[in-house]
Image (cartoon, grey):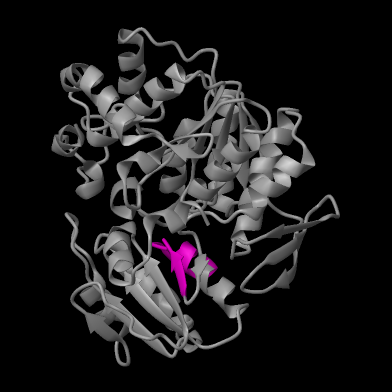
Amino acid sequence: MHEFLQSLVNYEKGLLKYQMEHFDPQRVGEMLSSAGFSYDHVRIFHVAGTKGKGSTSTYLARILEGVFPKVGLYTSPHLFRVEERIRLNGEMIHPFELDALIGQWQDLIQEYECSFFEAMTFLAMVYFLRQGCEAVVLETGMGGRLDATNFVERPAACVITRIGYDHTKFLGDTLEKIAREKAGIIKPSTLVVSAEQEGEVRQVLEKTAHEQGAKLVYAGRGYELVEVSRERWVYRFPDGDLWETRQWGEVFGENFLVAMEVMKQLSFPVSREVMRKAFYDPIPFRMWYREPFVFDVAHNEDSFRALFATLEKIPGEKDLYLGILEEKDLERIASVIRKSRGLFQKVVCFDFASSRPSGGKRLAMLLGEGVEYCAQVPGVVNPERLVVVAGSFYWAEEFFRLHGLSHDEVWKS
């Protein structure tokens, strides 16, 4: 049945122009109604942003599990298996269950001429509703206004993480244009919790919230990083307490505080034990440390800045391996990498097999002298330094295979 999903138009593998002709945010809602499903009783938390939306969604779902018996989490893209996108209380849907859903709803998916992402969004909602989820966290795929997840009419909360430059060919070439797309998830009379934003982004969010009669709250500030090592990071949060995590990266303190603020604004009772456990466990492939590797899905200038700021805090020599899609804003990314070039003894750009062109060779050319280029996913032999591997998701499976790493390590770390 997975072959059926692969046969659908997949804009993740080659985006068309971002317009209503190709993206209809109402389609999934109409399909659910046609199939006889109501989600009015489910608290849906809708998350958009440029960076941090995946980790914020994960944190929010973990915390909600301390309030509701069953919590659904829908994220994208996946690393190794499509089932990773649909999770119930942290456990991904079983392949047999996904196959059964596809078999039952294949005709409806074809009738509505769904894209791959629309089909996955519909199947995720059907799964969550059948499992009796009382809360669901939906991460947007790209943008927000025209996203397939934007069928939700009355979300429990809209969450917006940091907005920066990414997908500029489709969302716009200014922060204001990008922010308007992200702000498209804001619905009338809803709670909106946002990370701190640049001035022009704040203007867009505040204007949209005012027009929609929504309550806008900013969060994610007021914390202090007090201890850093490869094994743990310790923060002092605004409550004055020390909070420990195995997750590398100061930005994740901000993302967790955004999730906490959602719970505070909705007055959901959550135990301190649940909150601490949610923060302690690392987020898969987000500055994920597995000696001697650090894996990160940095693919825009802001996420590379955050990665390099993190690595500056970790002592020892490092090498950097970069595999990234050609469609990304490689000029901006190259500029950020050049400024932090001194962090690394060696920088290697590589290409990888993908339905969307990889940009390793072009990035190497932009970075210039002293940068190595590899035409395929490289094998790192007997690494003596910390090996940082960053960029797009699509090389992950091949890199893991070459280095004898297990998929399960990512999800059970």
Q: Quadrant of residue 28?
A: top left
Left/right placement of residue 321 relative to residue 39 reads left
Q: Quadrant of residue 3?
A: top left
Left/right placement of residue 28 relative to residue 361 reads right
**Is 113 above or below relative to 341?**
above
**Is 402 above or below relative to 221?**
below
Number of numbered discs: 0
Residue 353: % across, % down: 18, 63
Residue 343: % across, % down: 50, 85
Residue 370: % across, % down: 32, 92
Residue 280: % across, % down: 66, 54
119 or 405, which is in the foreground?
405
**Is 86 above or below relative to 225?**
above
In which quadrant of the rendered image does the N terminus lie?
Answer: top left
Residue 325 visible to the viewer: yes
Q: Residue drawn 42% across and 57% down?
A: 165
205 or 226, which is in the foreground?
226
Q: Residue drawn 40% across and 72% down?
A: 389
Left/right placement of residue 3 relative to residue 97 reads left
261 or 398, which is in the foreground?
398
Residue 328 visible to the viewer: no
Left/right placement of residue 407 relative to residue 138 reads left
**Is 285 above or below relative to 359?**
above
**In this view, which residue lies farthest toward the right?**
240
Q: Is 59 included in the stretch rendered in magenta? A: no
374 or 328, which is in the foreground?
374
In the image, which residues are magenta? 293-306
Q: Residue drawn 60% across and 40% down?
A: 62
